[in-house]
Amino acid sequence: MLEGKKILLGISGSIAAYKIAALTRLFIKAGAEVKVILTESAKAFITPLTLSTLSKNPVYSSFTKGDEGEWVNHVELGIWADFFVIAPLSASTLSKMAQGNSDNLLLATYLSARCPVIVAPAMDLDMFAHPATQKNLDIISAYGNKIIPPNNGELASGLIGAGRMAEPEEIFDFVLAQTQIKLPLQGIEVLITAGPTYEAIDPVRFIGNHSSGKMGFALAEVFSNLGARVTLIAGPSHLKLANNLVQRINVISASEMFNAVMQHHSKAKILIMAAAVADYTPALVSSQKIKKSSDDMKIDLVQTKDILKEIGKLKLPHQILVGFALETDNEEANALKKLKEKNLDFIVLNSLKNEKTGFGYDTNQIQILEKNGAITHFDLKLKQQVAVDIADKIIELINA
Ligand code: CTP
């Protein structure tokens, strides 16, 4: 049932921790590979030896192991896992997850995990009902974590109410159901660029543009929700991602963006270059602030590398390459020229002639021009919906 699936179990301090022995057995019996992380306080309720015996793997609880203090790589654990199940989830661990606190191995792994995270809260009824706990659950749910609600029943305090961790069988069924969901882009690597680039003139000034990054960020969220593993290379932008599964790499200049794309492009199947990359950069960057001296001043500019064009040259047969074109005149002809020159599968054209489209707006009106000559016109839509249209076109190409 779960053959080949890698499940990372995170156990925080709650009396329900003893039930995780049974849950570990259920996962192992179903064919999953299991690794366990315990918080210090969880050790009072279940021993590492019990869990290492049942999971057939070492159990992790601190950032180092052995006499030599060898580092336990929480990033690798997070990347290893197909699913990270945190059960029981104590009120304290929940609040730290909501805040981004990483003061133990479980939390550091949570912050670096790129897989779906499923949590099973366990706490006393008043703790569970407290507005702070409910708010923290809303926060982690908005980050994309899945919550298995606690049951009603008798609690360790003797009180009766909601707060009892879901039973191991219920947690098992929930995780199993998640593994059955097949999203259209499950596990597919996607590389997206977004936002502007800033080209330094001196330590305080730069040449930039009005791109907000909204379109590229919307694409990253939509592709991640479709199951893809998304790497977003973003120029300077105040935007935040709601989805913590997207790997965001921040860059500033066109050359930094070029280097980041070069590092990541070969493993991607889908590449969407939505960034408004500067075409020119100052030939020399002054190390001191340039002082005002004469009435006019000139800055020598040199061309940046065209990232999309370079990727087009290196494009592998299985890759799908998408570019954007922002045009003010001869829109279709210019976009078609870019489509050919940059070896794209399709180009997304947005014309600045349309109202409420382009930089800063939440909406966009696009056309998709394909290399086979097909042109599709779309209505004015929110950028999230435009991102869905682009994803649909890519799914159509993959399934063709
Ligand atoms: N692009 C890029 N690297 C650059 C310039 C552009 O990757 N140095 C990409 C953009 O991300 C976009 C596409 O190329 O996907 C087209 O960008 P655009 O600015 O419209 O076109 P340019 O090729 O720069 O041509 P021009 O500015 O002359 O219209």
Image (tube, rainbow, N blue to C red):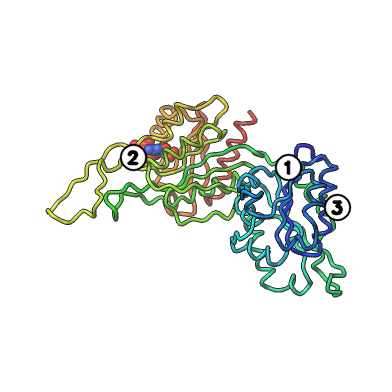
In this view, 305 is above or below 357: above
Q: Amino acid at mark 1?
A: Lys
234 relative position to 295: left or right: right
* Residue at image mark 1: 6
Picture residue at 53% right of the left edge, 43% below the top: 378
The residue type indicated by label 2 comes to Asp
Can you say which quadrant of the picture contains the N terminus? Answer: top right
Picture quadrant of residue 279? top left
Frontmost of labels 2 and 3 is: 3
> Mark 2 against mark 1, which lies toward the viewer?
1
The answer to which quarter of the image holds residue 162 is bottom right
Earlier along the polypeptide chain: callout 1 or callout 3? Answer: 1
Q: Residue 6 location, x and y as percent?
A: 73, 42
What residue did someone put label 3 on?
A: 22
Q: How far apart are labels 1 and 3 at the CA level?
A: 17 Å
Residue topped by disc 2: 279
Q: Residue furthest front?
A: 67
Residue 220: x %, y % from top left: 55, 46
First in sequence, mark 2 or 1: give its number.
Answer: 1
Name which residue lies at 87% across and 68% down: 153
